[in-house]
Image (cartoon, helix red, strand yellow):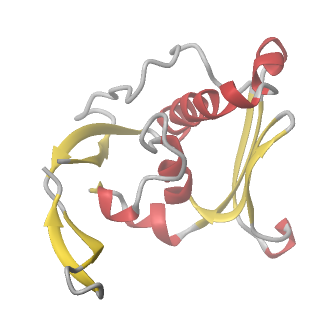
Amino acid sequence: MKPALLIGALSSVLLQAQQSSPPALKFEVVSIRRHGADSGPVQAGPTADGYRSIGLPMIAIFQVAYAPPNQPGVLRANQIEGDPVWLSNELYDVVAKVDQPDLADWRKPQMRQTMLRAMLQAMLAERCKIAVHLAQKEMPVYDLVVAKSGRSSNRRRLWI
């Protein structure tokens, strides 16, 4: 089974943490605005003192915030269900700054990814009023394997 992220209204679904991150971690200052022509080029990622996502839909932030723990990469879009249309269709500029007491840990590469995910999750719950529920779900996946003849072949497999 692969994890799926179900998004719903805050009043009907409890926010469940995907990892054991301290709940107190959150950005000190957050600015979320609709993307405009004067916002600059598309970019996303951590900065020396926070996080910046320019010209991307909010679903991109969900994909980073709820990526599987201890794995590089992002949560795939097909693992997210129940998301409102605006989450994927509207572009936003997000700029967030880390609180001064947390800045020393933020600058440690081994801690930044865990901190980023926890802070993004807190930001999404607080600012977007959207909660998530993590669930296991069978999903089709494809493997590229070498056949006995030595040629590659596609084989369909379900994660269990």
Q: Is residue 15 above or below residue 5?
A: above
Q: Is residue 117 left or right of residue 155?
A: right
Task: State the image quarter where residue 11 is shown.
Answer: top left
| 117 lies left or right of 154 | right
Q: Residue at x 36, y 60 (%)?
A: 84
Question: Which residue lies at the image location 60% right of the left edge and 30% below the top edge?
Answer: 119
The image quadrant of residue 105 is: top right
Name the foreground residue: 30 vs 142.
142
Going by the picture, which residue comes out furthest to the front?
Answer: 149
Where is residue 101 shown, x and y percent of the image?
Answer: 81, 11
**Image location of residue 6, percent across then percent down:** 27, 47
User: Is residue 101 or residue 153 the one in the foreground?
Assistant: 153
Q: Nearer the viewer, residue 122 or 38?
A: 122
Q: Residue at x 82, y 27 (%)?
A: 107
Q: Is residue 107 left or right of residue 79?
A: right
Q: At which x and y percent is residue 55?
A: 70, 67
Count of numbered labels shown in the rendering = 0
Measured along the vertical axis of the image, is residue 15 above or below residue 43?
A: above
Above or below for 124 versus 89: above
Q: Position of residue 100 (x, y in %)?
A: 84, 17
Where is residue 103, by image quadrant?
Answer: top right
